[in-house]
Image (cartoon, rainbow, N blue to C red):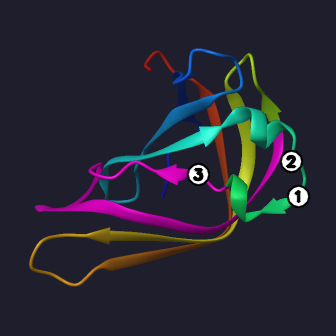
Amino acid sequence: MLELPCLVGLSLTQRPGGPSAVECDLTGGLSGKLSFIVDLGSIASNLNKIVPAALPIPVPGHSLMSGADSYSLQALRGTAEFTAADVSGRSFMGRFVDAEMVFSRAGTADVVCHSRNTLYSGAPGNFL
């Protein structure tokens, strides 16, 4: 599960509404961060639409911890719907309509997590 709100970093292109990294702390017996990139300008222009193109881009190498085991995020696919976006305030509200996250660890089978109709939100963070 994600601890909400996730934190939205400064624009990677140094222009408001550009792509920004998002970091979400994990809860529910898991530790680590789920990180991905969102384009706030694209989100703002596609509010209240189910759009696969607006689904966040995963940042490989960020891990999910379960006990002593560590997994790296390899893929994040599916659809999302955003209901609010504040481009200059670096925040958003939305939900994963139907998403799949694929985590891997050397020497083991991939772990696939499904998220259906799951709310998530972002608020300003102090990082790039």
* Rendering coords of residue 18 (x, y %): 65, 28
Question: Residue furthest toward the bottom?
Answer: 109
Mark 3 → mark 2, Cα distance in angstroms: 14 Å
Residue drawn at (32%, 68%) of the image: 103
Residue type at mark 1?
Lys
Secondary element at image label 3:
loop
Label ID, residue 56: 3
Residue 19 position (above or below residue 46): above
Q: What range of the chain is rendered magenta?
A: 55-84
Mark 1 → mark 3, Cα distance in angstroms: 15 Å
Of the numbered discs 3 and 2, the one sitting upstream in the chain is: 2
Residue under label 1, please give it.
49
Give the prevailing secondary structure in the magenta stretch: strand
Residue drawn at (77%, 41%) of the image: 42
Residue under label 2, please give it.
46
Q: Do the residues labelled 1 and 2 touch (CB within 8 Å)?
A: yes
Describe residue 115's horizontal placement relative to residue 41 as left or right. left
Residue 67 visible somewhere in the drawing: no
Residue type at mark 2?
Asn
Secondary element at image label 2:
loop
* Rendering coords of residue 8 (x, y %): 56, 29
Q: Are marks 3 and 2 in contact (CB under 8 Å)?
A: no
Residue drawn at (56%, 68%) of the image: 77
* Rendering coords of residue 12 (x, y %): 51, 24
Residue type at mark 3?
Pro
Nearest the camera: 11 or 119? 11
